[in-house]
Image (spheres, grey):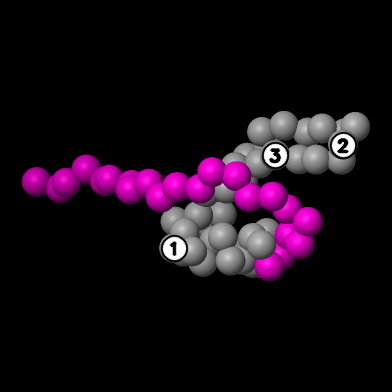
Amino acid sequence: MHTALGDDLRLYVVTVDQQHERVTFRVEVTSRSLDDVIGLLTATLDRATLGRAQVTVIRRPRNY
């Protein structure tokens, strides 16, 4: 995943279903667009199912 998405990747495992051999995870990437992330995930994980995807804005405090 780091090779495909870069070093700023944050990956969180949400659930592991050993019976059905499934892992649900959350991905956060700040250096790529949502379209890029979706494209890279679907190209890298050929048997994956993509769930909800959204863009969030990270706001940093202003320096006065």
Magenta region, main secondary structure: loop
Instruction: Label 1, secondary structure: give it.
Output: loop
**Label placed on residue 20:** 2
Could you say where residue 64 lies in the image, as x and y percent from the top left? Answer: 9, 46
Please, is residue 29 above or below residue 4 in the view? above
First to last magenta residue range = 43-64
**For this view, does 36 lie left or right of residue 59?**
right
- Residue at (57%, 48%) from the top-left corner? 27
- Residue at (45%, 47%) from the top-left corner? 54
* Quadrant assignment, res 22: top right
* Quadrant assignment, res 25: top right
- Residue at (51%, 66%) from the top-left corner? 36
**Residue 1 shows in this picture:** yes
Could you say where residue 37 lies in the image, as x and y percent from the top left? Answer: 54, 61
Q: Nearer the viewer, mark 2 or mark 3?
A: 2
Whole-Å distance between the Cαs marked 2 and 1? 31 Å
Name the residue that disc number 3 marks.
24
Q: Residue furthest left?
A: 64
Please, is residue 59 above or below residue 15 in the view? below
Identify which amino acid the numbered label 1 is placed on.
Ser
Instruction: Label 3, secondary structure: give it.
Output: strand
**For this view, does 27 lie left or right of residue 43?**
left
Residue 29 is one of the magenta-drawn residues: no
Q: Nearer the viewer, mark 2 or mark 1?
A: 2
Task: Give 52 or 30, whichever is nearer the viewer.
Answer: 52
**Residue 31 shows in this picture:** no
Name the residue that disc number 1 marks.
33
Whole-Å distance between the Cαs marked 2 and 3? 12 Å
Q: How many marks?
A: 3
